[in-house]
């Protein structure tokens, strides 16, 4: 199967600028990236095709050769399997996609001298609704990698030090000819660090870091919600051989509350009231999240499901001076285990009831009788 024209693959013209080329590649690479299309074989093929085309056209010399000779410019000495890139093709793009998609091998990046940034760490913390309301200073115990004190992070035994890699001369990369071009790949001797350790530290085995448990303080501000992420810069895993440390991310989750349901900054709760209070009206005390006692005025004739709003009695809005509201929904409670006298009084009340005291029941009975009457008329007509 013949290869498609690289310009066609990227959807650009042969006269496109570097900016247009990069923009087209970025857009298509994000669209067809395997991480965004798991299990889609067509996207994997398309993604490799995009990589291949962009690797050639982004380089001025390679692009000039391609414009003149086409795919044949990269087939000499390539050994098949792509435009002369072989097994090193994937590594050529690691820096490109790390910049576009934020990906990296374990979260670390190498710098000169073999130093690597430490990985980011995640810690899951569960807090109560009251703690989310007030905020708190929490203590967390984190097992993580820290700089080895014995070798001060160098990875070398005391009295020795890392040596410049003889294979790459400290560059961390090696070059080799591939057809018309010279390609670079990660040095296999030092794995891109540019240095090798002949006499590694006994404490860290040359890694420059050891595993320890640390106690950290985390400030949780008032108003945090379920899923809030708090970043502690530089509190992640220590870097390799003196590299910068990663970050620590605290992910918060809220415990279910026995009284309140949260909706953003608003709180909802259900409060039972007596049948007498619902009928005659009255004042009902309800607990607020701040520990105080709030009161709602229940008007006479209130039904189950009636809702009352207490302004400003909800949760604080994160990093602001505003607060949500509290919504109280009442539920009329039916009395149980009545005494004989109570039953007599209720029976007497029922006899005295009229459509004015129980308009909904009266209306239902009226509609019910009308419905039954309609059925009777149908039977008469059918007879």
Image (spheres, helix red, strand yellow):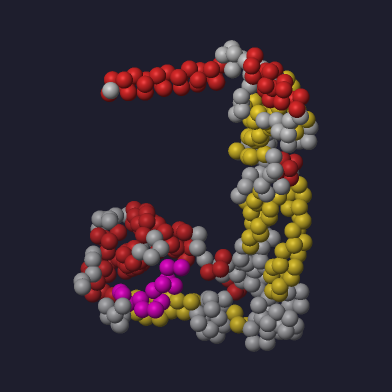
**Is 114 on the left-hand or right-hand side of 133?**
left
Indicate the position of residue 217 as horizontal and vertical percent values: 76, 55
Q: Could you tell me which residue is drawn at 37 percent across and 23 percent down?
A: 375
Q: Could you tell me which residue is drawn at 45 percent across and 19 percent down?
A: 369
Residue closer to the observer: 200 or 286: 286
Query: Which residues are the magenta region?
Result: 82-94
Magenta segment's dominant SS is helix
Q: Is residue 319 visible?
A: no
Task: Report the quarter where the N terminus lies.
Answer: bottom left
Query: In the rendered image of this protein, does residue 312 appear above or below residue 146?
Result: above
> Is residue 343 inside the magenta stretch?
no
Task: Report the quarter where the C terminus lies.
Answer: top left
Query: In the rendered image of this protein, does residue 267 appear above or below residue 205?
Result: above
Of all residues, the one furthest to the bottom in this rendering is 198
Query: In the rendered image of this protein, does residue 53 appear above or below residue 282?
Result: below
Q: Could you tell me which residue is drawn at 37 percent across and 56 percent down?
A: 31
Indicate the position of residue 140 as horizontal and vertical percent values: 74, 58
**Is 290 on the left-hand or right-hand side of 11?**
right
Q: In which image quadrant can residue 309 be found?
A: top right
Indicate the position of residue 313 as horizontal and vertical percent values: 70, 31
């Amino acid at each position: 199967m013949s290869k498609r024209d690289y310009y066609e693959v990227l959807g650009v013209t042969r006269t496109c600028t570097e900016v247009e080329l990069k923009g087209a590649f970025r857009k298509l690479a994000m669209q067809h990236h395997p991480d965004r299309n798991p299990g889609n074989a067509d996207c994997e093929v398309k993604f490799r095709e995009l990589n291949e085309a962009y690797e050639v056209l982004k380089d001025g010399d390679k692009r000039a050769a391609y414009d003149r000779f086409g795919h044949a410019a990269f087939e000499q000495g390539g050994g098949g399997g792509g435009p002369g890139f072989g097994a090193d093709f994937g590594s050529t793009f690691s820096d490109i996609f790390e910049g576009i998609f934020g990906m990296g091998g374990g979260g670390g990046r190498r710098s000169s001298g073999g130093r690597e940034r430490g990985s980011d760490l995640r810690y899951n913390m569960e807090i109560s609704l009251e703690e989310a309301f007030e905020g708190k200073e929490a203590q967390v115990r984190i097992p993580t990698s820290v700089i080895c004190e014995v070798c001060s992070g160098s990875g070398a035994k005391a009295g020795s030090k890392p040596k410049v890699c003889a294979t790459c001369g400290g560059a961390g990369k090696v070059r080799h000819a591939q057809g018309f071009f010279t390609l670079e790949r990660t040095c296999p001797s030092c794995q891109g660090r540019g240095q090798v350790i002949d006499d590694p530290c006994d404490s860290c085995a040359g890694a420059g870091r050891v595993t320890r448990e640390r106690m950290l303080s985390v400030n949780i501000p008032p108003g945090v919600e379920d899923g809030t992420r708090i970043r502690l810069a530089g509190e992640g895993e220590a870097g390799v051989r003196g590299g910068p440390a990663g970050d620590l991310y605290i992910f918060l989750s809220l415990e279910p509350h026995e009284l309140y349901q949260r909706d953003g900054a608003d709180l909802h709760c259900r409060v039972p009231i007596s049948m007498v209070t619902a009928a005659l009206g009255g004042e009902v005390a309800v607990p607020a999240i701040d520990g105080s006692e709030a009161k709602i005025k229940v008007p006479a004739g209130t039904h189950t499901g009636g809702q009352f709003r207490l302004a400003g009695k909800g949760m604080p809005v994160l990093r602001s001076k505003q607060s949500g509201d509290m919504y109280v929904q009442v539920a009329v409670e039916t009395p149980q285990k009545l005494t004989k006298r109570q039953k007599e009084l209720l029976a007497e009340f029922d006899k005295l009831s009229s459509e004015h005291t129980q308009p909904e029941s009266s209306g239902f009975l009226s509609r019910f009788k009308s419905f039954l009457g309609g059925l009777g008329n149908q039977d008469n007509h059918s007879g």
